[in-house]
Image (cartoon, rainbow, N blue to C red):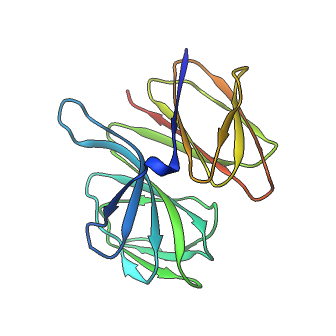
Amino acid sequence: MTTTRLLPASAHREMPWKNGRGVTREVARADDPATGRQLWRLSIADIDEDAPFSPFPGLRRIISVLEGAGMVLAVAGEAPREVRRFELYPFDGAARTDCRLLDGPVRDLNLMFDASRVSAHWEWLAPGTDTTVRGTTGRVLVFSTGEATITVDAAPAIRLRRFDCIDLETTEPCELALTAEAGVRCAVIELTVP
């Protein structure tokens, strides 16, 4: 069984960064009902200048550039790495992380999750392609970078605008297909909570 909920861009919650150097727009999140601690969160951030990232002990991060030339992330204990549009970079949220912009501001999509409780799989879906999600005891988030239509199995197509997201809860495998103009991508993020 699959249930679908649309999370429109207009409903994203805006909040300041922990270090006060920018603003994040929260797309979706889930907290542990027993403790209130964050299990996972998907958010968009604008980075306007070279700056350190806020530390998030106990959380794993995966980041990808949505707009802009890209950035170099220097994560403690790892070689600095360039992250360009639609590339994925996983790293420890607790590690000191410094960001250097390659050529002006960027906008990124950032997934943070408690890796001791949640496993995450993220892929970028291009127009005219499809993918099968496994169907688990977790969630599937489908985030669009532009005007797109997503079809889930044989259900009616869902129209997405820029930065809209679909939150799917499914207990069985389902097929996702993307129709969009060239350049538009959808992040398909599977989150499994045992």
- Please state the horizontal and vertical placement of residue 9, each as a whole percent of the image: 51, 50
Q: Quadrant of the N terminus?
A: top right
Residue 142 horizontal side relative to residue 175, left or right: left
- Please state the horizontal and vertical placement of residue 182, each as a whole percent of the image: 80, 56
Name the foreground residue: 3 vs 65. Answer: 3
Name the foreground residue: 9 vs 28. Answer: 9
Name the foreground residue: 58 vs 25. Answer: 25
Q: Say above or below: 47 vs 86.
A: below
- Please state the horizontal and vertical placement of residue 162, each as a whole percent of the image: 62, 53
Q: Residue at x 44, y 71 (%)?
A: 78
Q: Say above or below: 94 vs 97.
A: above
Q: Quadrant of the C terminus?
A: top left
Q: Say above or below: 155 vs 91.
A: above
Q: Residue furthest front?
A: 10
Q: Residue furthest left?
A: 35
Q: Residue at x 41, y 58 (%)?
A: 25
Residue 147 horizontal side relative to residue 75, left or right: right
Residue 19 horizontal side relative to residue 191, left or right: left
- Using the rendered view, name the quadrant where residue 36 is placed: top left
- Using the rendered view, name the quadrant where residue 2 is placed: top right
